[in-house]
Amino acid sequence: MTGETRPTALIVGCSGIALSDDERSFFRDADPLGLILFQRNCETPDQIRALVDDFRAAVGRNDAPVLIDQEGGRVQRLRPPHWRDAPPAKVFANRYADDPMGAREGAFLNALLIGRDLADLGITIDCAPVVDVPQPDAHDIIGDRAHGQTPETVVDLSRAVCEGLLAAGVLPVIKHIPGHGRARADSHLELPEVDAPPEDLRAVDFPPFKGLCDMPWAMTAHVVYTALDANDAATNSASVVHDVIRGELGFAGVLVSDDLGMKALEGDFGTRARRALAAGCDVALHCSGDMDEMIAAAAGAGLLSVAAQARLERAENERLAAGSSPVLSEAALARLEELLT
């Protein structure tokens, strides 16, 4: 994947449980970097494997990233009867106060089991864990998805989740960098504005991401931090990406935008993709599967940069080198249920 063979710096969705002829043709011609799956795309294990294989065949890359949001709790695209109903992060956060070691073990085992479900389907990246530290007056869009109420708890449990996913051969995505925990609005619906002073951000919001800066992928927050850049959301802010995310927090992995389709962003989809990438995101994310929007986003995104390509290759090498946990899934599930009882 060098030179002109670099794919388009865009991850896309699709509309249903199988690729349409138009989608297959578009993916072949536009060559988006990867695919993200949602509940609308997930019916049975064999169906998902076929969908994943079809996408990779269309773009001509057997290692094309396939992503999903499988956190547990209210954010999980794979659900019973074919897949386990995984608990939300709050379950482990609640246990942490009395039993940090048990909470860490439970978070690891839960992520390991999630990761094995994903790997079995050919999914290589999980958009988890949520590393935001929620504040009392914030919108509940983060809520029980958070791994605690303090930076120390969040970073400890989030690292356990990352290690569990990696032990299953799946890359974690820490989100929403540099922190969504103070947002008083849901960025799916409007643009949140956080007016906390820099010292508060550095004391609470930044430390979990700095503590996990060695992780392979991160996802940006569609949030304006007035102390950092009063004009643009972090996704579109060169100063936030370069000075804070890459600089102060030391994150050196693949940086993907949150969904371009969220109402926190403005403009046509070509403009949205261009702005995120111009700010320093490596890859733009478009989730809806709407063909007209995908065509515009792909045109705006252009080819993956050489630097982004190098980061992607490092991440994939880390996934391949991570090895697998010797713990059998049956034993992991039994121990997890014991911890949760």
Image (cartoon, rainbow, N blue to C red):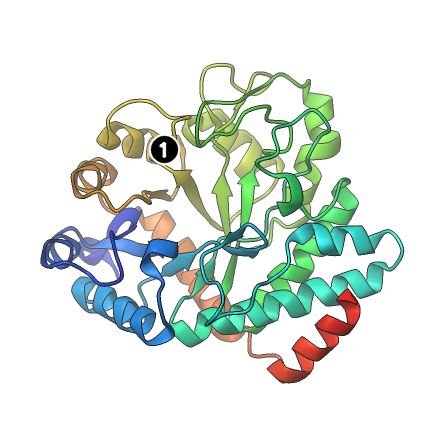
Judge left or right: residue 191 versus residue 6. Answer: right
> Looking at the image, can residue 80 be seen?
yes
Q: Pick the quarter of the image with the N terminus.
A: bottom left
Identify the residue at the far right of this view.
Answer: 98
* Closer-to-camera residue (99/273): 99
Count the marks: how many? 1
Spot occupied by residue 120 in the image (x, y as percentages of width and height): 43, 76
- Quarter of the figure with residue 286: top left
Q: Nearer the viewer, residue 35 or 334?
A: 334
Residue drawn at x 22%, y 42% is 290
Is 243 rendered above or below residue 286? above
Q: Label 1 neighbourhood size at 10 Å, few (<14), some (14-19), many (20+)? A: many
Looking at the image, the residue that sits furthest to the front is: 81
Please name the residue shown 69% across and 48% down the image.
147
* Relative to 4, 188 lies left or right: right
Secondary structure at badge 1 equals helix
Q: Quadrant of residue 312?
A: bottom left
Quadrant location of the C terminus? Answer: bottom right
Residue positioned 44% across, 27% down in the render = 189
Position of residue 25 relative to residue 220, above or below, is below
Q: Position of residue 246 (x, y in %)?
A: 53, 39
Horizontally, is 147 left or right of 58 in the view? right
Type of amino acid under label 1: Ala
Image coordinates for residue 338, horizontal then vertical, percent: 78, 73
From the top left corner, tell me how far across and down residue 29 is, in percent: 11, 54
Q: Residue at x 37, y 49 (%)?
A: 308
Taking depth in this image into account, of 242 and 18 the one nearest to the observer is 18
Which residue has dot 1 on it? 276
Q: Can residue 38 be spotted in the picture?
A: no
